[in-house]
Image (cartoon, rainbow, N blue to C red):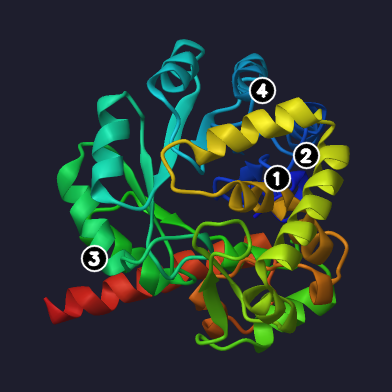
Amino acid sequence: MGYVSTAALVAATSSAGGFGILAAATMSLDELRTAIADVKRATDAPFGVNLRADLPDARARIDLLIRENVRLASFALAPDRDLIRRCADGGVLTMPSIGARRHAEKVAAWGADAVLVQGGEGGGHTGTVPTTLLLPQVVDAVDLPVVAAGGFFDGRGLVAALSYGAAGIAMGTRFLLTSDSPVGAEVKRLYLDASVTDTVVTTRVDGVPHRVLRTPFVAALERSGRVSALTRALRHAATFRHLSGLSWPALLQAGRAARHGRNLTWQQTIMAAGTPVLLKTAMADGRPDYGVMAAGQVTGLITDLPSCATLITRIMAEAEDTLTRLSKLH
């Protein structure tokens, strides 16, 4: 949700009764500070911030959340025990995103307050286990609130997740496709026109499995040789270094952190460093022909662009209708 879950979308979501989460992984520390201030000016409702635990300034970002009384820090990569403790000491709740039962058990033992479980059908970085199998595993394994992600877009899905024992659902693609989303009309149209089979899981974006829309650009990435892929990765990494304000040593430090615990080559690490540029090109600059668009398979079931307020009201009404129907069966 980098360049998508901006201050405006977060404020619209939280104001409508959801819990907006600011996508800060593609922001510099100063940009994050500004975005938090923008959300707070727009709404008094609580919200969270998503962080990358492997960034060199992760602790400084957490300190910022503490000073600004941000309610929750979510993490795309599992934070270590020290980061969780730092949040807890400052009164910030933590919710790591996980894709396996053992990961949930680990962060629960470290003191996380909740976990977000994303099944394989979700967009962006994902695993192979579908939500319907992963969710009950995690609910049974940890004594924490569990938020379900991957494949949700309506009130029926909310009831289904609650029936498994989840505390609620998280939706990325569904909120990307709202009138409050900053994504351009041309890019939104590509999502709306896609079917459930028009996404692909590729490692050619940043070295790890990444579910994105199937486009000619992604097909070219899949076909590219090692030399051309490395050249492209270096160019994107250099652009991201300029946008983020990171020095080359800091960028390399982030790369080493990203490699930790993974079997990534340096080429894949450099690809990961340049991924934000591919996201920005499509999502912020409106150039899907030269960018990457993370997408859950659920994009094939979405047909409209409601406001966040309309969407949340509709989901709750659908959930009530579903519960009423099920009570009649009982």
Which comes sooner in the sequence, label 1 or label 3?
Answer: 1
Q: What residue type is labelled 4?
A: Asp
Q: Residues within 10 Å of mark 4 (few under 14, many from 20)?
A: some
Whole-percent x, y for residue 112 in the image: 36, 29
Element at label 3: helix
Farthest front residue?
Answer: 227
Q: Quadrant of residue 254?
A: top right
Q: Residue at image x 24%, y 48%?
A: 101
Tell which of 224 and 44 is nearer to you.
224
Q: Residue at x 78, y 75 (%)?
A: 187
Name the quarter where the C terminus is drawn.
Answer: bottom left
Q: Do the residues labelled 1 and 2 touch (CB within 8 Å)?
A: yes
Of the numbered discs 3 and 4, the one sitting upstream in the chain is 4
- Which residue, as the protein is rendered here, is positioned at the far left? 330
**Is 238 displayed left or right of 47 in the figure?**
right
| Circle nearer the N terminus (3, 2) | 2
- N-term-proximal mark, 1 vs 4: 1
Give the labeled residue for mark 1.
11
Check disc 2 and give the amino acid type.
Ala
Q: Are marks 1 and 4 in contact (CB under 8 Å)?
A: no
Q: Which of 166 and 204 is in front in this view?
A: 204
